[in-house]
Amino acid sequence: MLPENITAIVTRNETWTGTTASEPFEAGWAKEAVFFVRALKEPSGTPGKGSVEISPDGIHWIAEGTEFTLPAARDAIAVARITHFGNWLRVRAQLDDGAHCTVLVTLHLKA
């Protein structure tokens, strides 16, 4: 039996500033997940921090614990791998005042 997998684009060509988050994705069927965050344009300012958030309902969010540095150059990629996440997933980003990063965020899920 082949494993079931899917790739979902949860943020496309969006410029992140301040505190922001990707679109949530319902992924309760999956056993593992990988977020890729790619800078589509040259970021400005200090690279921000990203973190994975989980939710029981897609409305109320809590930090899952996985953290990473956002990409610091055009076409650079940040990654976050997670397991044991319940049903809903998203990426949260925190950038310093004046900093911004235009991103493509993909979520790769495998049963």
Image (cartoon, grey):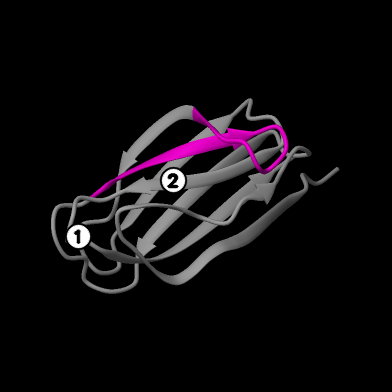
- Please identify the quarter of the rendering in which residue 17 is found: bottom left
- Estimate the x, y position of residue 41 in percent, counting from the top left: 28, 74
Residue 48, compared with residue 53, is above or below; it is below
Magenta extent: 48-63
User: Where does label 1 land, which residue?
Assistant: 99
Sequence-earlier tag: 2 or 1? 2
Q: Residue at x 75, y 37 (%)?
A: 28
Q: Is 64 situated left or right of 24 in this image? A: left
User: Where does label 2 land, which residue?
Assistant: 92
- Estimate the x, y position of residue 14 in percent, counting from the top left: 42, 70
Q: Amino acid at mark 1?
A: Ala
Along the viewing direction, whichever of 29 and 62 lies nearer the viewer:
62
Q: Residue at x 48, y 30 (%)?
A: 63
The extreme left residue here reads: 45
Q: SS for tag 1?
A: loop
Q: Is 22 situated left or right of 24 in this image? A: left
- Estimate the x, y position of residue 59 in percent, counting from the top left: 65, 42
Q: Residue at x 78, y 48 (%)?
A: 4
Q: Amino acid at mark 2?
A: Arg
